[in-house]
Amino acid sequence: MTVEPIVLPRSISARVKAIPASGIRKYFDLVSTIPDVISLGVGEPDFSTPSQIATAVTSSLARANYQTTHYTSNYGLLSLRQALSRHLHSLYNVPYDPASELLITVGVSEGLDIALRALLDPGDEVIIPEPSYVSYVPCTILAGGVPVMVPTRELNNFEPQPQDIQAAISPRTKAILLGYPNNPTGAVASRQTLQAIVDLAVAHNLFLISDEIYDRLVYRHRHVCVASLSGARDRTILLGGFSKAYAMTGWRIGYAAAPTEILEAMMKVHQYVIMCAPTVAQVAAEEALASGERDVRLMVEEYDRRRNVIVQGLNAIGLHCFEPQGAFYVFPDITSTGLNAEEFAERLLQEEHVLVVPGSAFGPAGAGHVRCSYATALPQLEEALQRMRRFVERTRQ
């Protein structure tokens, strides 16, 4: 019997076809084919979710708690939103009404998607400092927007420069999208810099979207919440979550905080595509806010110890690395090897079984760098540095 080929009635979306696959994905696919790999590629804590958080969920399920096994409000559990409101006010002195200004999302990823879809009309421009997280550009395009990239430079520790953002503003600009502490560079933006960017948003009547998923992972600094700055709150969508600070990536739970009118627009998208974030994950998040602070402090202390080891180790190898002040990434310059970022990452993986991610996966400004995650146990980090030393020495012979 002859099987006729399937002929689609029309082509799939040109917008989707135009978006390349993630520049990170192929390296993760390669890992499964290579034994003894040390991965410095995954942006995920190597810690388990604190036990009391998981216990709170299993206890609720064991009691056949109705709340744990059914839908919540589209906005999320009110008790979680109330706890989150107290949390943000305590940390950053930013007040949010739990009834109308907080929305529980399926991670920051969903929060970013619905924020862009709620704000953008076709052709609206979004200014994005880069290197930037891999989702920022595709999500902007999928929402019908036009990403306008503003390079940051190692000379400025990858901190965005307000004058560069000013130069990128056009009559089509709708929003500025910030992600600090930064993935992939580990950069932290100062209060002065962020206030200058907020002032630009006020002067040009722009929205601000601030992805602050790494807000608790800062070293020798205090995190500056964009929404806390003068003039920012009424035009800012603050995105955050539980994945990084509480080691809860698999729970897929985040939040958006914004003035009522903006949040209501986001909720319209959320209610039709998601309904509500998973209820068990919301129960876990509420417990994290109630009892997870000690665990956060201990994990940050360990990340800081690893940060010092990997920064010193990379510089000793001859891969210049500025000192990141946030998140759990370093972003060394590998141009001294004579390789570009893709060649470096592929050869390092094949020859020494160490996974890093080319900086170019995060935008053109990442060229000549690779991202290394230190959310990896210290003995593995030390072994990875030894393997990288061997590799670098070979490239220079």
Image (cartoon, rainbow, N blue to C red):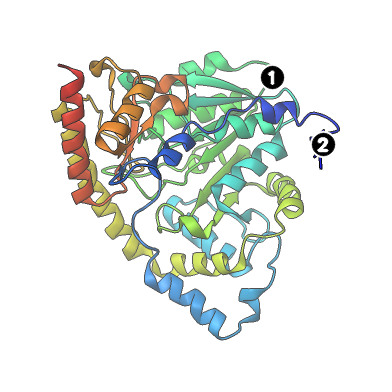
Q: Can you identify the residue that label 1 sits on?
A: 172
Q: Nearer the viewer, residue 1 or 219?
A: 1
Q: Nearer the viewer, residue 92 or 138?
A: 138
Q: Nearer the viewer, mark 1 or mark 2?
A: 2
Residue 113 percent location from the top left of the image: 64, 41
**In the displayed structure, does residue 305 sit left or right of residue 14?**
left
Q: Amino acid at mark 2?
A: Glu
**In the displayed structure, does residue 59 sit left or right of residue 69?**
left
Q: Can you identify the residue that label 2 sits on?
A: 4
Q: Amino acid at mark 1?
A: Arg
Q: Nearer the viewer, residue 349 or 339?
A: 349
Q: Nearer the viewer, residue 130 or 194?
A: 130
Residue at 18% over, 50% down: 379
- Residue positioned most to the bottom: 63
Residue at 41% over, 38% down: 30
Residue at 40% over, 34% down: 184
Dividing the image into 4 quarters, which one contains the C terminus?
A: top left
Residue at 28% over, 46% down: 36
- Vertical relation: 285 (above or below) 235: below
